[in-house]
Image (cartoon, rainbow, N blue to C red):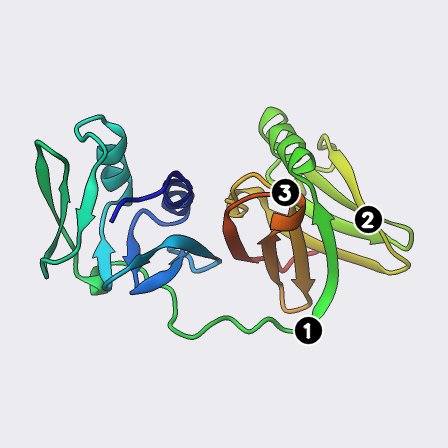
Amino acid sequence: MKLSENTKTILRNFCEINQSLYVQKGTTLRTISGMKNILAEATVSESFPRDFAIYDLGQFLGGLSSQIYEDPEFDFTPDTYLLIKDAHTKVKYFYCDPDLITTPPDKAIEMPEVAASFDVTESQWLRIRKASNVYSLPDLCLVADGKNITLTVKDKKNSTSNTYSVLVGKTDKTFEYNFKMENIRIIAGTYKVYVTDNLLSKWVLDTDIANSPLRLTYYIAMEPDLV
């Protein structure tokens, strides 16, 4: 088996959520943060033939990008390690005990009733993230005022905080939901986002709009306090 560039992109993103990874047999990759407030799921083109766990995903990916291999292939035949090899080299990369790492629950997440939804384009999200970084704004607030739905980055602890807002929809409802920017560790893209009163959100990469080969869904916890 070889890993596609799309799968490597997903793995690099998952490494930002959890530095370890438990892979289950099949075509679905899942990871969860140590605080269990971010869960990501992806469908990949490869079908993994067995369950296995990687303790240091960053190290694993670093090996793939360090040019110590030429077009490596992955042999999952051994029970205790992954054999990575090319025409002239091979590496035994040993699996870790899944009990040593934080793994996603076996049961799929069931979303509560959706209270609101909106779309955010890739360009909108990149501008929001850049504004958050430039102005050191840690909070992302989703606010509806009966007409417009906006995403605003700000510092809720500072009454004179700078703010940056983007219009993402129209509505006749009023609501407020809040995130920590540090928890939104998504691959750049266009997303359909669903929020619930149970403070759980679902971010689905919109492959139709973005024309992306990636199949990604994130479940991200929101903050209990209001604006």
The alpha-carbon separation of the residues under discs 3 and 1 comes to 26 Å
Q: Is residue 37 left or right of residue 152?
A: left
User: Measured along the vertical axis of the image, is residue 177 above or below residue 126?
Assistant: below
Looking at the image, tell me whether mark 3 or mark 1 is earlier in sequence order: 1
Q: Residue at x 57, y 43 (%)?
A: 181
User: Measured along the vertical axis of the image, is residue 39 above or below residue 14?
Assistant: below
Tell me the crowding category of disc 1: few under 14, some 14 to 19, or many 20 or more residues within 10 angstroms, Cα based: few
Q: Which residue is mark 3?
A: 210
Looking at the image, tell me whether mark 2 or mark 3 is earlier in sequence order: 2
Q: Which residue is mark 1?
A: 113
Tell me the crowding category of disc 2: few under 14, some 14 to 19, or many 20 or more residues within 10 angstroms, Cα based: some
The alpha-carbon separation of the residues under discs 2 and 1 comes to 20 Å
Q: Position of residue 23 (x, y in %)?
A: 30, 59
Q: Is residue 167 left or right of residue 78?
A: right
> Is disc 3 in contact with disc 1, using a CB cutoff of under 8 Å?
no
Tell me the crowding category of disc 3: few under 14, some 14 to 19, or many 20 or more residues within 10 angstroms, Cα based: some
Find residue 24 and report its image quarter. Answer: bottom left
In front: label 2 or label 3:
3
Q: Position of residue 55 (x, y in %)?
A: 22, 50
Identity, as a three-letter code, of the amino acid under mark 3: Ala
Q: Which residue is mark 2?
A: 169
- Residue 53 seen from this side: yes
Indicate the secondary structure of the residue bearing disc 3.
helix
In this view of the protein, which residue sits in the foreground, 216 or 70? 70
